Image (cartoon, rainbow, N blue to C red):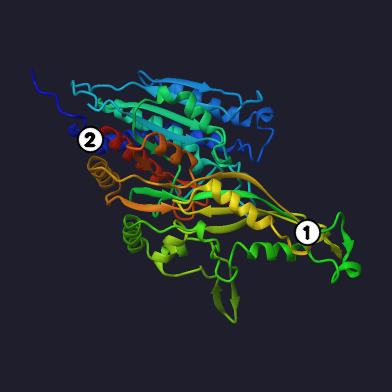
Amino acid sequence: MNARLPASALPLEPQALQSHVDAAWRSSIVPELQRYIAVPAKSPMFDPDWAAHGLLERVLQSAADWVRAQQVPGLQLEIVRLNDAQGRPRTPVLFFELPASEGKDGTPAPASGQTVLMYGHLDKQPEFNGWRSDLGPWTPVIDDGKLYGRGGADDGYAVYASITAIQALKAQGVAHPRIVGLIETCEESGSADLLPYVDALKARLGDVGLVICLDSGAGNYDQLWLTTSLRGMASGVLKVEILTEGIHSGDASGLVPSSFRIMRQVLDRLEDSGTGRLLPASFHCEVPAERLAQAQATAAILGDELFKRFPWAHHDCGGATVSALPTTTDPLEALLARTWRPTLSVTGADGFPDIANAGNVLRPYTAFKLSLRLPPLVEAAPAVQQLKALLEDNAPYQAKVTFEGLSSATGWNAPSTTPWFEQALQDASQAHYGAACATIGQGGTIPLMNMLSQGFPTAQMMVCGVLGPRSNAHGPNEFLHLDYARRLTASVAQVIARMP
């Protein structure tokens, strides 16, 4: 009897793999994503009546119907639903599982018996303003190889790419490990409903040896990018109240302190407005030596594209164009600033009339929605408690100052890369991009990753995605780079086939 080759030595044909994936994207995935983009399936934080509106249900059912239509041999699919302690429905998840399989030539399935977990989400951020005149958040448009519209890149493509990667392996008849998929509908709200599902499905997840998360970014569109860290996040509404109703500013200003000025004073406790540095030492952490070395290598690859990629405001002054400036033009510092340092952003405001309707009135209150990004190694829960105390205590003028937390999540730092995983990534990147795989930290937050690292501490984490330069997730003109997405899909399939 002939000896069977291990899965990592299987004769995989990258060109045939890529051709299969490309055909699936053209004929099936792109049309499906166009239909998905047209549905304003906003996350529960932005649509509290999501259950009644049925839009999350609509995109979830559409994805489930598409997966079933692919008729992947052996794949089982279901929509899982749970209620909270009060009996209210949680946002549902799509769960699929596929048993391990030997190759058509008798090559055995991976000997470890471990599972691959594939993750994505279908809920979306709200519209935002500033879209190009020929584009819109719910109007899918393909232009210059990019599919524009809200949610296509973040993260509607993930379930379709995952299933297509599996199909590509089946088409080549190669052995593969057991694979499960978890597609949620609450990620943009901090994955508030996800942990109960992970607990409920834990036995069915199995012994997870590899996590593939397709919800991250890329430093450029020229190579495969592996995310090695994610910042945490704490968001909430800070409100300063000084009056019970608006007063004529000519009568009251100078005596009644402005709620906006009090807001500035309160925020000065948290942030140095001159530099943007967060003041509490506990919100900072030391960058691990391995991540610092990776950042140096990535800075050398990307250079000034790290800051030139953004749509800076500019104006003409005497015939010379003056552009707005970043906090730093040093590539390494730029990379660390957006991945390993805490940062405060004001993402919304209340208490302000529109400029057209703003009279001479001293406003009774000012409210800001705050988004605080935390370094990967800083725990979110104690940071939120400290943030609340810092902002609320000893209010200037004894104003009523409240901070109401909305969502929070601890960041994530990837485990050390094993030799098989490192080699698989490099081989996949060379095969499908013609360049080496590179690593990058991301400034965003994926709450699931920290949960999974705690639950499966030895699992390898293939955290990657299509959110490259100017893709602008959450903002106007979000796009999915179609060629990059096709190559990423094939790369994912190739990495799965190499799992020992």
Q: Of discs 1 and 2, which sits in the foreground?
A: 1
- Quadrant of image for the N terminus: top left
From the viewer's side, name the closer residue of 78 and 128.
78
Q: Is residue 1 left or right of residue 474?
A: left
Q: Residue 479 at x, y = what percent?
A: 50, 47
From the viewer's side, name the closer residue of 376 and 16.
376
Instruction: Count residues near mark 1 (Cα–Cα under 10 Å), then give few for <14, some for 14-19, many for 20+.
Output: some
Residue at left offset 39%, top offset 20%? 75
Residue at left offset 10%, top offset 23%? 3
The quarter holding residue 90 reads top right
Q: Residue furthest left?
A: 1
Query: What amino acid is found at the position of numbered circle 1 in the picture?
Result: Ala
In the rendered view, tell whether residue 44 sits above or below residue 176: below
Q: Residue 416 at x, y = what percent?
A: 30, 46
Q: Looking at the rendered structure, which numbered label has been put on residue 399?
A: 1
Residue at left offset 54%, top offset 39%? 187
Q: Secondary structure at mark 1?
A: loop
Q: Residue 412 at x, y = what percent?
A: 43, 46
The quarter holding residue 123 reads top right
Q: Residue furthest right?
A: 251
Instruction: Count residues near mark 2 (Cα–Cα under 10 Å), then give few for <14, some for 14-19, many for 20+.
Output: few
Q: Earlier in the sequence, mark 1 or mark 2?
A: 2
Residue at mark 2: 13
Q: CA distance from mark 1 to mark 2?
A: 68 Å
